Amino acid sequence: MTEISDLHHVVVVGAGFGGLHCVNSLAGAPVRITVVDRRNHHLFQPLLYQVATTSLATSEIAWPIRHVFAKRKDVEVLLAAVNGVDAESRKVLFEDGGSVAYDTLVLATGARHAYFGHDEWEPYAPGLKTLEDATTIRRRMLLAFERAERETDPDRLAALLTFVIIGAGPTGVELAGTIAELAHENIVEDFRHIDTRKARIVLIEAGPRILPGFTEDLSAYATRALEKLGVEVKVGAPVSECSADGVVFGGVKLPARTILWAAGVQASRAAQWLGAAADRVGRLLVEPDLSVPGHPQIFAIGDTVSITGPDGQPVPGIAPAAKQEGTYVASVIKARLAGKPAPAPFHYKHVGSLATIGKRAAIADFGWLKVRGALAWWLWGFIHIYFLIGFRNRLGVALSWLWAYLLGHRSARLITQGKQWAGEEKT
Amino acid sequence: MTEISDLHHVVVVGAGFGGLHCVNSLAGAPVRITVVDRRNHHLFQPLLYQVATTSLATSEIAWPIRHVFAKRKDVEVLLAAVNGVDAESRKVLFEDGGSVAYDTLVLATGARHAYFGHDEWEPYAPGLKTLEDATTIRRRMLLAFERAERETDPDRLAALLTFVIIGAGPTGVELAGTIAELAHENIVEDFRHIDTRKARIVLIEAGPRILPGFTEDLSAYATRALEKLGVEVKVGAPVSECSADGVVFGGVKLPARTILWAAGVQASRAAQWLGAAADRVGRLLVEPDLSVPGHPQIFAIGDTVSITGPDGQPVPGIAPAAKQEGTYVASVIKARLAGKPAPAPFHYKHVGSLATIGKRAAIADFGWLKVRGALAWWLWGFIHIYFLIGFRNRLGVALSWLWAYLLGHRSARLITQGKQWAGEEKT
């Protein structure tokens, strides 16, 4: 019998979609696997905006990594923050001084939101990547309505009831649509002094149109659907300032107390750990087999790499791409260990693009089929629930949505972690 | 038509069980009502320990106060932290400098946990009163297992796998039982290096027996049920020290990295706001009609008052008592406004006591009926779900429980808000 410690050791850093699928695809291979993540949970990021906008609870879209792999005796999970790689001695280094040795390393460390060199905007315009980001946004948004209810000065009131979303990719569009529904439909009856139907939701995009990943007609449809919900869509309007008072875009100042950032991403520091070549947002440049140049035993997948699809277009930073890359890298590792020839270079297959605009509209583009409106919304809901990990979450999310859909309620309207009402006043 | 601002103005501070029931019972009375709370949500505190121990999500036991009263056009809700009362000019004062004038004031400001003059223990032994307390306890407990998984030193490992609960009232017993189930059943398969079945759960009580509010035989049954779950029950053992290293009780030092406090309560500062008489834990002494002596237009209810039942025993700090007091005060206010004679003095009716010990055991004492074991557990579950506010929450909680019961899963095993793994290391 082979001693387990003699087995080829694959270390996967990051338990997002890419890392998880890589580990899943390595099942049965003659390896032992260690998954390292700084979080104890896998996060279903495509639905994170629904936590931020009070529709879902945090635990409905997150699942303990340990529990995902409980039955996989070949998999060990470590909670640790990685801050370096010693490629010489083949070790992953942890912030707390620990380390783990690898034979093969898979970097699936993802991305954070980024401010295009304006990190000083972050306190005023939080982004959305983690559960904490989502509860922060939820708290700020709900507090703005609470403060508005007690505000008498008309200018301050207007700023409190203005919600600015910067960046009109899927996340920005989804945030804008759901905030508009929250303000204009769900909470109207709850306030006595303010009319939340008059809240302004302003979606700002530097480029010429929203959802640039979609065709022009779907993008135009999404703009009309957003405007129907009461969202003001401003395109061709780069933001030049974010502060506690509001934003400046296209030379115009808009007073606003709630600003959300959905504009830019920055890859994790994986390229720096390796001293390897990266693109301008820090994504590793990799070989056709997704290994890092000069490091055949190190692979990188998901939002932390920059690759080009067969059409010459960059592979988008979405879950299906990360999953395909994870599965592909597992096949390369298995072929190597079996002494078989390397698989053909990675080939990204675009299954389709989906974006939702509030409760009854969405757009879907599968190439051969373009759908919009209510049908696309149901398709979107079905696909997202299907892909959620774990039956419990699927059922919980399905019920939360059904409930919200039927009655217009939001189940998770909690202001938490803000220390105090008075404390938040200062941010 | 009466102008709404001419109506008698009742201000209720605190939207716990007492405040909520007072407002409910005032429906239809010729008053306008303002509810002031420093939180935006009503919290179903009896189930808070289930959030702390990963069985329920935060939003399953909390509900926006505004939403509870959305249909009550006579009710206004203000999110504000009260820090004083000006009884002379009949105003409630807010921390942020604001205020609200009242004709009648109902103080339902509740209690916090207290450390018997040892506030320096708080960082090491968090208590359980708010959603943040619950997620803090959840984070610390889960991190202890995570750190244990990576620990090699046997002494540090033992301290990481020792969980101490101080105080064996219902909350302490419920925490101990559910942590034992978590460690000894639910997460056993998730770890590779540690055997979580060997985790020690130690319940420490200064008094001679656990659950002193119950009869001796039910208390003895609860002890046996806890021991069956693997909880070590230590009675007659006052704690003399809490630190980062562990606890000292009955002269014995027990190294432990996770200590939870369920021992003492301290009333809110309502007595100080009024300069009124209070008992040793700060609870207001009130007239038989629950008004504050010398302030006939100010009432106090719930955990913020000290009253004695018809049997000469203190009225317990539990939800049914607060609800009865809220309803009673509403009847006094209505009688006054109608020019009718005052109702008979408040008379507490003890409906029964319930405590649960893990997944299949509970004790219930209704006076005429004492139940223990599985039947009591189902009774406990039914009663708690029944009283949860809002159908959505009932359904969500029922499903979470059913799921956990059938499969031994925990749905909310999230480590959040801890900044970083490395940062928590220092606490």
Image: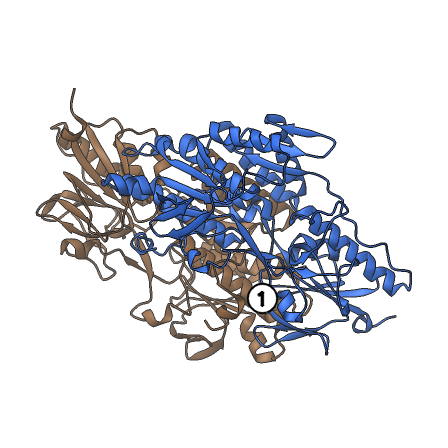
Chain colours: A blue, B brown
The percent coordinates of residue A102 (x first, y second) are 74, 71
Label 1: few (<14), some (14–19) or many (≥20) C-alpha neighbours in 10 Å: many
Residue under label 1, please give it: B145
Q: Dot 1 lies on which element?
A: helix
Which of the 4 image quarters holds residue B340? top left
Asked if A371 appears above or below B417 in the picture, the reply is above
The percent coordinates of residue A225 (x first, y second) are 52, 29
Q: Amino acid at mark 1?
A: Phe
Which of the 4 image quarters holds residue B77? top left
Could you tell me which quadrant the C terminus of chain A lies in? bottom left
The percent coordinates of residue A331 (x first, y second) are 82, 56
Which of the 4 image quarters holds residue A271? bottom right
Q: Nearer the viewer, residue B38 or A361?
A: A361
Image check: A23 left or right of B118? right
Q: Residue at x 63, y 41 (%)?
A: A213
Q: Residue at x 71, y 35 (%)?
A: A366
Q: Nearer the viewer, residue B236 or A7?
A: A7
Q: Residue at x 56, y 45 (%)?
A: A60
Q: Nearer the viewer, residue A190 or B394?
A: A190
Asked if A320 appears above or below A88 in the picture, the reply is above
Image check: B377 left or right of A385? left
